[in-house]
């Protein structure tokens, strides 16, 4: 059985009466295409679509001495943090006809080093790290999403943690909460310390007291609601009442709600609970979760955009790009008991 006829670049050129060189320049986004009129570019792209032209990747690679491939190094890919970031990376790269390879290190420094070498050996043109500790910048163009360490030559895509703290703490203050419990994130994540530093700074500015007896440190790495459950139990075991709980992320907040309910406490009537991230399940939990939305998909898109700009020759790039958070108020927060 014969396969479908392969449409060549030469066939596209003959179809519209132009030279193969002109068609190639447009379809491969060559710098020489800048002098070609936009109307001509539109004709070429329309003809390529009409004829179902598919570029020969290997010919393109040999011709331009490029692989159009990047590497993504992540802590995890199936968790509620890394997955939407990688989705954003994929969406942007797909539009630009780039391919990517993803590796997962799970906090193993030896594996992280080995994967960095393997990606380079496989010809990737740049690297995006996701929530990953890198001790020194790779030789390739590199962008970090939530980089754990500021490195020269690496652009860090991060959340504006100060703005996030302002949104969250002012919401709780507006609800008349004074006795607030906090669940700090695992120190292995850069976001944990940055977020906590911002919370402490903003709390001092607005006159909100942070009680050490109402603060607990998450020190495990469970990607399920079990992450927050035992630490909320710790807070409850201290027998020091609180009217609100601000969890490190939505997953830990959901686990904390279970612990509160087992203790006979109602959310939000007795204790308000606030999360962070706005994972897909936050809106469907009962009660639905008030949270600070971290636009993770957008952070992935921005990371991919910045990396391609660097790969393709842009000389000026920032050391950090802060993405704006958003407060999402749902059912899990209410006025503190006894206030109006």
Image (tube, rainbow, N blue to C red):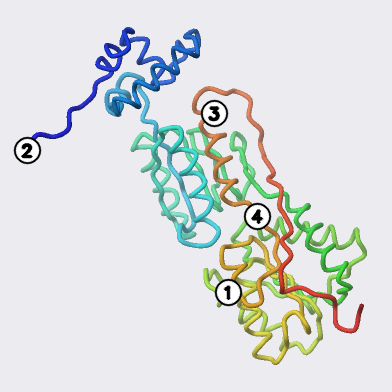
The residue under label 4 is: 294
For image coordinates 39% across by 22% down, the residue present is 46
For image coordinates 26% across by 14% down, the residue present is 10
Along the horizontal axis of the image, is 43 left or right of 208? left
User: Which callout, 4 or 1, points at the residue further toward the start of the chain?
Assistant: 1
What secondary structure is found at the residue carrying circle 2? loop
Mark 4 nearby-residue class (10 Å; few <14, some 14–19, many ≥20): many
User: Which callout, 2 or 4, points at the residue further toward the start of the chain?
Assistant: 2
User: Which callout, 1 or 3, points at the residue further toward the start of the chain?
Assistant: 1
In this view, 138 is above or below 164: above
Along the horizontal axis of the image, is 313 left or right of 157? left
The residue under label 3 is: 310
Q: Give the CA distance from mark 2 to mark 4.
A: 52 Å
User: Which callout, 4 or 3, points at the residue further toward the start of the chain?
Assistant: 4
Q: Where does the image place residue 258, in percent across and percent down from the top left?
A: 62, 83
Q: Give the CA distance from mark 1 to mark 2.
A: 56 Å
Q: Give the CA distance from mark 3 to mark 2.
A: 46 Å
The residue under label 2 is: 1
Q: Nearer the viewer, residue 118 or 276?
A: 276
What secondary structure is found at the residue carrying circle 1? helix
The residue under label 1 is: 227
Q: Give the CA distance from mark 1 to mark 3.
A: 38 Å
User: Which callout, 3 or 2, points at the residue further toward the start of the chain?
Assistant: 2
Q: Give the CA distance from mark 4 to mark 3.
A: 25 Å
């Amino acid at each position: 059985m014969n396969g479908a006829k392969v449409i060549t670049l030469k066939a596209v050129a003959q179809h519209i009466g132009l030279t193969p060189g002109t068609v190639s320049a447009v379809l491969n986004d060559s710098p020489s295409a800048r002098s070609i009129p936009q109307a001509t570019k539109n004709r070429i792209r329309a003809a390529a679509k009409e004829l179902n032209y598919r570029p020969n990747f290997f010919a393109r690679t040999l011709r331009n001495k490029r692989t159009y491939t990047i590497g993504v190094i992540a802590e995890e890919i199936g968790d509620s943090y890394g997955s939407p970031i990688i989705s954003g990376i994929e969406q942007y790269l797909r539009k630009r006809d780039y391919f990517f390879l993803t590796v997962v290190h799970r906090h193993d420094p030896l594996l992280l080093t080995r994967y960095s070498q393997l990606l380079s050996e496989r010809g990737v043109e740049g690297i995006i790290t996701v929530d990953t500790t890198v001790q020194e910048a790779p030789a390739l163009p590199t962008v970090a999403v939530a980089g754990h360490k500021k490195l020269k030559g690496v652009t860090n895509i991060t959340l504006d943690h100060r703005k996030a703290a302002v949104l969250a703490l002012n919401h709780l203050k507006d609800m008349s909460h004074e006795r607030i419990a906090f669940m700090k994130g695992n120190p292995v994540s850069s976001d944990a310390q940055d977020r906590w530093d911002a919370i402490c700074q903003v709390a001092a500015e607005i006159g909100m007291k942070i009680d050490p007896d109402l603060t607990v440190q998450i020190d495990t790495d469970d990607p399920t609601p079990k992450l927050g459950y035992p630490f909320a139990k710790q807070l409850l075991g201290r027998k020091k009442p609180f009217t609100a709980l601000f969890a490190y992320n939505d997953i830990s907040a959901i686990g904390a709600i279970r612990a509160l309910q087992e203790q006979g406490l109602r959310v939000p009537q007795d204790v308000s609970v606030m999360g962070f991230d706005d994972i897909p399940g936050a809106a469907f939990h009962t009660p639905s979760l008030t949270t600070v939305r971290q636009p993770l998909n957008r952070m992935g898109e921005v990371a991919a955009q910045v990396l391609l700009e660097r790969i393709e020759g842009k000389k000026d790039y920032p050391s950090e790009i802060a993405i704006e958070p958003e407060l999402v108020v749902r059912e899990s927060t209410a006025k503190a008991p006894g206030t109006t």
